[in-house]
Image (cartoon, rainbow, N blue to C red):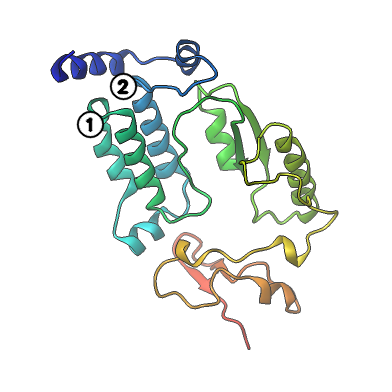
Amino acid sequence: MNTAVRSREAVQRARRGILMSQALAESGTGGPVELDGGERLQILDALITSIAGTYAHLPAKRAAYASDPVQALTLLRRRAADLSDTEFNRAVSAIVTGLRDAHTRYIGPSTLRDRVAVTFGLQARIAVELWSNAPPVMIKNVPHPSSRDATKLITEWRSAVADLRTVVTPDPEGDNSGPNYGSRFSESDYAPIPRGDLPYGVPSWLGDDSRGRQSRPKRRNTVERDPADLMHTLIWRAPTK
């Protein structure tokens, strides 16, 4: 089959789409899922919607790295049907990795075995509820890390970790039997935000709230919104020593 015919067929499939369940049935549960044009557009549309609509760090990422992931995904949409599976997944992965966010990853297609969707907070849960053709995987809804109800936060996170261990198989060199959360958060449960996920040139203390937790009264964040200007102003509180 020549390139023109293959491209034309890919465009036709993109227009009519295909259900993920159908793709899995065609490929078999033991092997990788080959994405057709319709599935590629579904992936890109889902990413565009979630990043543009619910990704709170998007303005900061645009300013810090002089790149626009939403625009890049939109441009990729125009040529998605003409790429090989490997080219498509590498392109999407490069865009998402470009966010430099340790919590945001794109994993290419394989099967739905060991796949789980974890939502952090109300907006993420609503986004998943609006996903009309979501794949049949476990969905765990847990509070966002910024929740002010520490008891509810650690209780639901501890329960989620226990449930996820029954579904997600660790990597060959990994181990999912480590300590779970206790009855209350300890300092060892926290970790600074990786420096690569922060904009260039920010102070060394930004992203590390340990001093705030040790202060009296305690402060949970080094950054907070100005009550008088919630939509535009952030206040950074530097350590006093």
- Residue 109 shown left or right of residue 164 in the figure: left
- Residue 22 appears left or right of 9: right
- As drawn, 19 above or below 237: above
* Residue lying at the far right of the rendered structure: 183
Question: From the viewer's perspective, is the residue at label 2 or at label 1 nearer?
Answer: 2
Q: Which residue is mark 1?
A: 78
Q: Position of residue 18 (x, y in %)?
A: 40, 14
- The secondary structure type at the circle numbered 2 is helix
| Neighbourhood count class around disc 2 (C-alpha, 10 Å): few under 14, some 14–19, many 20 upward | many
Q: Amino acid at mark 1?
A: Arg
Tell me the element at label 1.
helix
CA separation in Å, label 2 and label 1:
11 Å
* Label 1 CA crowd tier, 10 Å (few <14, some 14–19, many 20+): few
Q: Which mark is drawn over residue 37?
A: 2
Apparent side of residue 111 relative to residue 166 in the rendered image (left or right):
left
Q: Position of residue 152 (x, y in %)?
A: 78, 48
Residue situated in front as seen by the camera: 131 or 234: 131
Q: Is residue 209 above or below residue 178?
A: below
* Figure quadrant of residue 114: top right
Q: In the rendered image, which quarter is residue 213 located in?
A: bottom right
Q: Which corner quadrant holds the N terminus?
A: top left
Q: In percent of the image, x 56 and y 25: which residue is there?
A: 112
Front residue of 10 and 155: 10
Q: Earlier in the sequence, mark 2 or mark 1?
A: 2
Coordinates of residue 190 in the picture (x, y in percent): 68, 63
Residue at the extreme front of the image, as rendered = 172
Residue at 49% from the left image edge and 65% from the top image edge: 229
Q: Quadrant of the C terminus?
A: bottom right
Q: Amino acid under label 2?
A: Gly
Q: Depth check: 154 or 95 in front?
A: 95
